[in-house]
Amino acid sequence: MKRLYHICLVLWAVCNIGCSTEQQSSSPPAPALTVVSWNLEWFPGKDDQTAARRMKEVHQALIEIDADIYLFQEMADFESVEQLVDGLPGYEVHVVSNFKYGNRPAKQQLAIVSRFPAHSAFAETFKTPEGSRAPPRGFSFAALED
């Protein structure tokens, strides 16, 4: 335990030394990159009325947040993600997972949306032991260029 504490303390010190906020040169600072990860919990909703209201609320929030990259969790499908970012200038849906639960699509997909073009993007389901009834989960990936 004591050794782990010392390793963490050394890592903290290295990170703080290497991450100084002082400006060392006269060049202007690089623009900030904003990334938002948002679990939208069964988006857009379980019925049409809820879905329409949530779509409008989250769309408005995205306008206000104005991030460069969005990482969404628990999206219903590709169409929901496209509809959500429709009308937001410069955004592209790079990937929406297509995890299955048994033979039917799961309603908890992952999505990556950004202002940057993607070289590649994909999603992969985690491997589970044969015969397992594990919930559909996995990961999504997008290689973006600036």
Image (tube, rainbow, N blue to C red):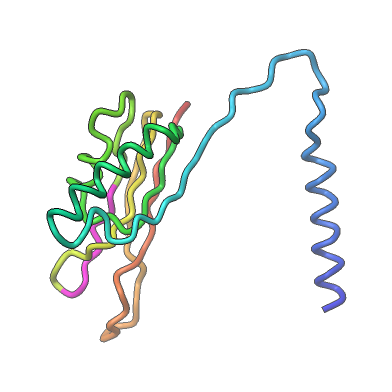
Picture coordinates of residue 113, whole percent (x, y): 35, 39
Picture coordinates of residue 7, whole percent (x, y): 82, 64
Q: Is residue 61 above or below residue 45?
A: above
In percent of the image, x 30 and y 39: which residue is there? 59
Position of 115 compared to 106: left or right? Answer: right
In percent of the image, x 78 and y 47: which residue is there? 15
Residue 103 shown in magenta: no
Q: Which quadrant of the view contains residue 8?
A: bottom right
The front one of 71 and 100 is: 71
Position of 1 compared to 40: left or right? Answer: right
Picture coordinates of residue 139, whole percent (x, y): 38, 58
The front one of 52 and 7 is: 52
Q: Is residue 80 above or below residue 144?
A: below
In the image, the segment drawn in magenta is 96-102
Looking at the rendered image, the quarter that the N terminus falls into is bottom right
Q: Which quadrant of the view contains residue 138?
A: bottom left
Q: Is residue 45 above or below residue 30?
A: below
Q: Which quadrant of the view contains residue 110?
A: bottom left
Q: Residue furthest top?
A: 26
Picture coordinates of residue 125, whole percent (x, y): 32, 64
